[in-house]
Image (cartoon, rainbow, N blue to C red):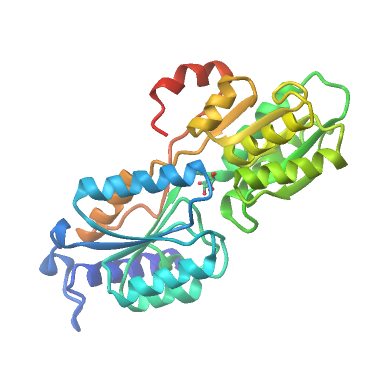
Amino acid sequence: MKKLIGIAAAGAMLLALSGCAGADGGSAAEGGPKPLDELVVGFAQVGAESGWRTANTKDIQAAFEEAGIELKFSDAQQKQENQIKAIRSYIQQQVDVIAFSPVVETGWDAVLNEAKAAGIPVVLTDRAVDSKDESLYVSFLGSDFVLEGEKAGQWVLDEYADTTEPVEIIQLEGTTGAAPAIDRAEGFAEVIAENPNLEVVASQTGDFTRAGGKQVTEALLKSNPGVDLIYAHNDDMGLGAIEAIEAAGLVPGEDIKIVTVDAVKDGMQALADGKINFIVECSPLLGAQLIEIITQVNDGETPEKRIVTEETTFTQEQAIEALPDRQY
Ligand code: GZL
């Protein structure tokens, strides 16, 4: 029943967008789609905390430029209250669609209900919300973060398959409460649990930033001198960890192995140089698919509720091969 209500509500939003949800709620065909150059979309971005985010922003802006759709863009500097403020201002401006990457999973129902009441469809890109009411957004486009954590865990499981000694792991978590941080930790823990020698001896947030990764690693190396491997929820924190490991007179990738997620250029270069040992890709190139969703909504169609982005993994050899053509 819930699913049906969700679809009906999404349908009502689509009618509103094509300007024909009048009293009699005429059909989408009557109102018809707006010309793309008359569409206005409000995008509330998380911030500019990492190489991934910068690449994501660039790709989204380029996709809107190419489509000839007006983009109102805001950078929340990783603060939820700023994202909520931006969404409210887009509602006030009566944009045609709102898209955003929720910095954390919780606390969105109120503002998303305001968008729904205003008849403005919302698209989630990159990160998810934990709302039970799926009618609050028309589609969620982004990675499967649990799978990313599982892929990282599988590499560690394989790497230490023959080890009989305990393997000490430090985990550098992403932003507290963010879907990628929660899910990458869950997927990783699930897989490494298969080998009781693998133990996460310390886990702390570095907030997805290079500085955060360096700071936390400096502290955790002191309290865990026997650490064997660092699992960082993104390349930027892994790159910060490299700085801390080298400052401690150790060799990253050898004395302490590093596994990260993202596969942005700087991370791939560190992998090619042997300072990182394995990277799970998380693609920031969501622009084209976001435009597709917006076009479908404008045409009165119902987009897929959940669109999972394609992504792979990289070893050192694969990074060396991929680097020359890397888009980000
Ligand atoms: C993942 C994205 C994460 C990246 C980080 O889709 O939300 O946020 O992994 C970024 O690099 O800061």
Q: Is residue 249 above or below residue 37?
A: above
Measuring from the top left, give residue 105's x and y in whole percent.
Answer: 56, 61
Q: Residue at x 30, y 74 (%)?
A: 119
Q: Is residue 274 above or below residue 189?
A: above
Q: Residue at x 60, y 47 (%)?
A: 209
Measuring from the top left, give residue 313's x and y in whole percent.
Answer: 54, 28
Q: Is residue 131 visible?
A: no
Which of these two is toward me, 56 or 214? 214
Which of these two is toward me, 140 or 42? 42
Could you tell whether 241 is left or right of 320 in the image? right
Which corner quadrant holds the N terminus? bottom left
- Label total for image: 0
Which of the 4 image quarters holds residue 224?
A: top right
Which of these two is toward me, 159 or 29? 159
Q: Residue at x 45, y 65 (%)?
A: 134
Could you tell whether 8 is left or right of 270 in the image? left
Which of the 4 image quarters holds residue 328?
A: top left
Could you tell whether 265 is left or right of 206 in the image? left
Which of the 4 image quarters holds residue 58?
A: top left
Measuring from the top left, give residue 300's x and y in whole percent.
Answer: 22, 61
Measuring from the top left, give residue 177's x and y in whole percent.
Answer: 63, 59
